[in-house]
């Protein structure tokens, strides 16, 4: 009884949030001062009759930076006129692009990034193997989620993250028409994981995904009843429409006025709390509180990677598969699934199957062991399968 009291759940919720914030402040100080955030683009001072050296002095650009931007062959080229390198617009575009890429490079922690990816591969592989061996995973799930957010969020920080790769790629291209190759590699790796094993990276590796998931889980009894209030499943047509609209507005604003509208509410900043700001804190508090009642609200309603990976997930090699030879159509899996995806899988509604976060709840509750994560192609249930069994 005490285990499932609203008071205990509330305290646990507060403890998790305070612990994450507190440890993240310490962790960001240990990693050092790299903000991993682009400075705002500065306005260039430019007159066509300037030489390159004068242009550099007016804009605080060193000779080595000028050499790289204008691809100079000899030192004497610095005395050439700016006009020789194009129109004002062309030069401004070239400088903005090169400076943006240089800033990207300078703000990254090149020790942490490969280390984090190595840990991601090991952790996801371990979870995959563990989950294949164990059918009853409820208790273990909470600890794995907690461990994951401690490693990939608290210890390794907010960046990189699956969401950040999509968001920052769009923003950088929108503001500077630049593509940062390391980010595209990271995005390719994340999407390759989705292609291989469903949303495993979101399920067990994403810093904000795991935090929301853990909060949702602590508000459930062992029989998956909400301890505080009611846990609801929002219709996918609603959540996905909001997610598409949000990404469209984000892209439009990034390309038209160069502003990153996610930055001020970015929930990943819980892992670098000093950058949260007032709007970020209010949004984060609302999001985490909502996570008690709705499964992964950020993933379903806002996350750009959530949307992109939902599309890739359609072709995932390993995914939830139901064996209709042994299924007794009790639909316990659909009831236990934290979102509407399992009921869509049972209906085989191919076009609108929502995001599956590989949480293994459906497999755990199935009384006939008819659900597996497997490479088998999904098959249709026999005609009127559920109606007949219900009848
Ligand atoms: S959908 Fe959720 S879990 Fe996946 S990247 Fe976005 S925030 Fe993380
Ligand atoms: S319960 Fe099953 S179908 Fe639902 S999200 Fe979890 S793994 Fe996917």
Image (spheres, grey):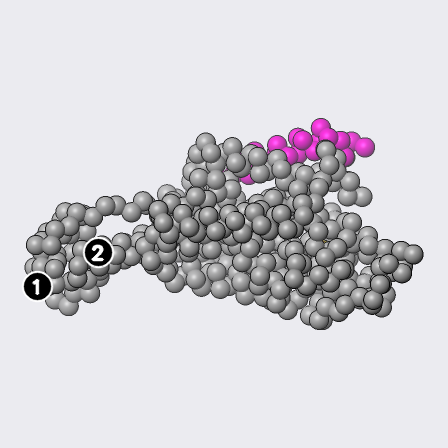
Please tell me which residue lies in front, 113 or 285.
Answer: 285
Q: Nearer the viewer, residue 148 or 226?
A: 226
Q: Reply above or below: 219 against 100.
A: above
Q: Which residues are magenta?
A: 1-25
Is ligand 1 closer than 8 angstroms to the Cβ of mark 1? no
Category of crowding for the residue at label 2, using alpha-carbon neighbours closer than 10 angstroms: few (below 14), some (14–19), many (at least 20): few
At 78% from the left and 54% from the top, the residue drawn is: 333
Q: Circles 2 and 1: CB distance less than 8 Å?
A: no
Taking the image as shown, residue 18 lies to the left or right of residue 223, namely: left
Q: Is residue 25 visible?
A: no
Q: Residues within 10 Å of mark 1 (few under 14, many from 20)?
A: few
| Coordinates of residue 329 in the picture (x, y in percent) | 85, 58
Q: In percent of the image, x 46 and y 48: which residue is there?
A: 249
Q: Is residue 350 magenta?
A: no
Of 252 and 201, nearer the camera is: 252
Q: Residue at x 12, y 63 (%)?
A: 84
Which mark's residue is nearer the viewer, 2 or 1?
2
Q: Is mark 2 within 8 Å of ligand 1?
A: no
Does 10 appear in magenta? yes
Residue 239 visible: yes
Task: Check disc 2 and report the residue beneath it.
Answer: 89
Q: Quadrant of residue 389?
A: bottom right
Q: Which image quadrant for residue 33?
A: top left
Q: Secondary structure at mark 2?
A: helix
The quarter of the picture where the N terminus appears is top right
Left or right side of 27 for 1: right
* Place of residue 174 in the rendered image (x, y in percent of width and height, measured from the top left): 37, 54
The residue at which mark 1 appears reads as: 76
Please identify the residue farthest to the top as the structure is shown.
Answer: 7
Identify the element where label 1 is drawn: helix
Residues at marks 2 and 1, CA–CA distance in whole angstroms: 24 Å
């Amino acid at each position: 009884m005490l285990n499932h009291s609203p008071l205990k759940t509330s305290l646990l919720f507060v403890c998790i949030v305070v612990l994450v914030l507190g440890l993240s402040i310490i962790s960001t100080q240990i990693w050092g001062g790299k903000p991993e955030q682009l400075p705002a683009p500065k306005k260039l001072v430019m007159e066509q009759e300037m030489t390159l050296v004068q242009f550099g002095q007016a804009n605080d650009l060193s000779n080595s930076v000028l050499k790289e931007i204008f691809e100079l062959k000899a030192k004497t080229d610095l005395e050439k006129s700016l006009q020789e390198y194009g129109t004002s617009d062309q030069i401004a575009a070239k400088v903005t692009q090169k400076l943006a890429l240089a800033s990207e490079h300078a703000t990254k922690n090149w020790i942490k990034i490969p280390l984090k990816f190595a840990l991601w591969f090991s952790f996801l592989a371990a979870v995959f193997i563990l989950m294949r061996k164990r059918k009853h995973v409820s208790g273990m799930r909470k600890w794995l989620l907690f461990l994951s957010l401690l490693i990939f969020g608290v210890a390794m920080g907010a960046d990189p993250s699956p969401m950040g790769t999509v968001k920052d790629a769009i923003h950088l291209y929108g503001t500077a028409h630049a593509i940062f190759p390391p980010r595209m590699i990271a995005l390719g790796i994340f999407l390759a994981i989705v292609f291989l094993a469903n949303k495993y990276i979101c399920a067990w590796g994403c810093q904000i995904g795991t935090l929301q998931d853990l909060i949702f889980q602590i508000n459930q009894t062992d029989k998956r009843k909400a301890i505080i209030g009611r846990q609801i499943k929002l219709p996918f047509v609603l959540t996905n429409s909001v997610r598409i609209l949000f990404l469209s507005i984000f892209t439009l604003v990034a390309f038209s006025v160069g502003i990153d509208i996610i930055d001020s509410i970015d929930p990943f900043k819980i892992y670098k709390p000093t950058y949260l700001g007032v709007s970020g804190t209010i949004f984060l508090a609302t999001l985490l509180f909502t996570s008690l009642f709705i499964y992964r609200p950020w993933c379903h309603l806002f996350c750009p990677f959530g949307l992109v990976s939902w599309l890739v997930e359609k072709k995932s090699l390993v995914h939830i598969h139901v064996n209709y030879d042994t299924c007794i159509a009790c639909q316990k899996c659909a009831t236990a699934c934290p979102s509407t995806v399992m009921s869509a899988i049972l209906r085989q509604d191919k076009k609108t199957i929502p995001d599956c976060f590989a949480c293994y709840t459906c497999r755990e509750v199935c009384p006939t062991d008819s659900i597996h994560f497997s490479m088998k192609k999904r098959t249709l249930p026999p005609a009127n399968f559920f109606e007949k069994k219900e009848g």
